[in-house]
Image (tube, coloured by chain):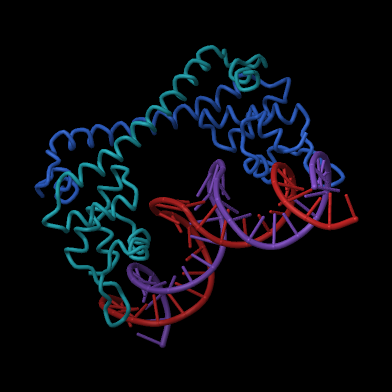
Chain colours: A cyan, B blue, C purple, D red
Amino acid sequence: MNIGEAAAQSGLPAKTIRYYEDISLIAPRRDANGYRDFTDSDVHKLGFLSRARALGFTIEHCRALLGLWEDQSRASADVKRIAAEHLAVIESKIADLCQMRDTLDHLMHNCHGDDRPDCPIINELANRE
Amino acid sequence: MNIGEAAAQSGLPAKTIRYYEDISLIAPRRDANGYRDFTDSDVHKLGFLSRARALGFTIEHCRALLGLWEDQSRASADVKRIAAEHLAVIESKIADLCQMRDTLDHLMHNCHGDDRPDCPIINELANRE
DNA sequence: CTTGACCTTCCAGCGACTGGAATGCCCATG
DNA sequence: CATGGGCATTCCAGTCGCTGGAAGGTCAAG
């Protein structure tokens, strides 16, 4: 099938699929006219990538996971290790963002937000020695 | 003072300070030899930027906040609006990441992580119809 | 034969830096 | 006065994961 159809079936934009070919995540064969021709297996891979990316795995993690998926003799420990590594990154991002949110929440709560210039948000950004 | 000293005092890398000048966030004057010469006021601005960035504000938000900081007749409502907008972005990122974390957590909990190939993490990525 | 929808490649840009090369300035020591 | 080391300067390229757009080729319908 053509790239448009593969895009529709996998949920990935055609541009993204071309990019994935560029970085050798997939390698669809070509028709005589140069058009990419995707098999069902290619589309399954794209779906796999789409779901892994939606879980926030980096492209390099996706590449590794794809390899493990295709390796029937993989050890589930290898998959779990990648997932754990990624989970740690996510947890850390969440912690950072929660910290920002709490600070902002606090500052906004103290800011009356009217037309007067006095503003604890600006003060906090300006003052901290 | 020189950029190294300004970097030490503001906590920002010299590279970042040069970048901030490039995009016109600051405009330190120059010595005869071409070296940037930072005033205390410049360094305060850099500190302001550093704290705003640490709270996750985009550069464009930082630019706006810096403008409001310097405007003695600002309305605190303007500051609060920017903060609220940013808070919404943060909340949404947190929600996305928590969703990922929960899914990953769940999958990892179900994966025995040994040397056998059977793996619910891979299955989830592969299978969802 | 033309139209329009698809496909191709290639180049540039996003945000916010960061690394590195090539070069210049300043100060202290021998 | 030469030299060395530690600063400073500019400019270019790379990061990550796409995304937009230009310029052109292909294909099926009317």
Location of residue A126 in the rendering, given as x and y in whole percent from the top left corner = 65, 21
Q: Nearer the viewer, residue B113 or B80?
A: B113
Name the residue located 16 percent from the left edge and 45 percent from the top edge: B124
Name the residue located 15 percent from the left edge and 58 percent from the top edge: A71
Whether residue A87 is situated above or below residue D25 in the rendered picture? above
Question: Which of the 4 quarters of the picture holds residue B100?
Answer: top left
Whether residue B86 is situated above or below residue A116 in the rendered picture? below
Instruction: Work out which quarter of the rendered image holds the C terminus of chain A and state it.
Output: top right
Location of residue D10 in the rendering, given as x and y in whole percent from the top left corner = 73, 54
Whether residue D6 is situated above or below residue B9 in the rendered picture? below
* In the image: residue A86, left or right of residue A112: left
Query: Could you tell me how many numbered marks the image carries?
Result: 0
Name the residue located 50 percent from the left edge and 30 percent from the top edge: B86
Instruction: Work out which quarter of the rendered image holds the N terminus of chain A and state it.
Output: bottom left
* In the image: residue B73, left or right of residue A25: right
Location of residue B43 in the rendering, given as x and y in whole percent from the top left corner = 71, 29
* In the image: residue B72, left or right of residue A26: right
* In the image: residue B17, left or right of residue B121: right
Q: Nearer the viewer, residue B44 or D6?
A: D6
Location of residue B127 in the rendering, given as x and y in whole percent from the top left corner = 14, 50
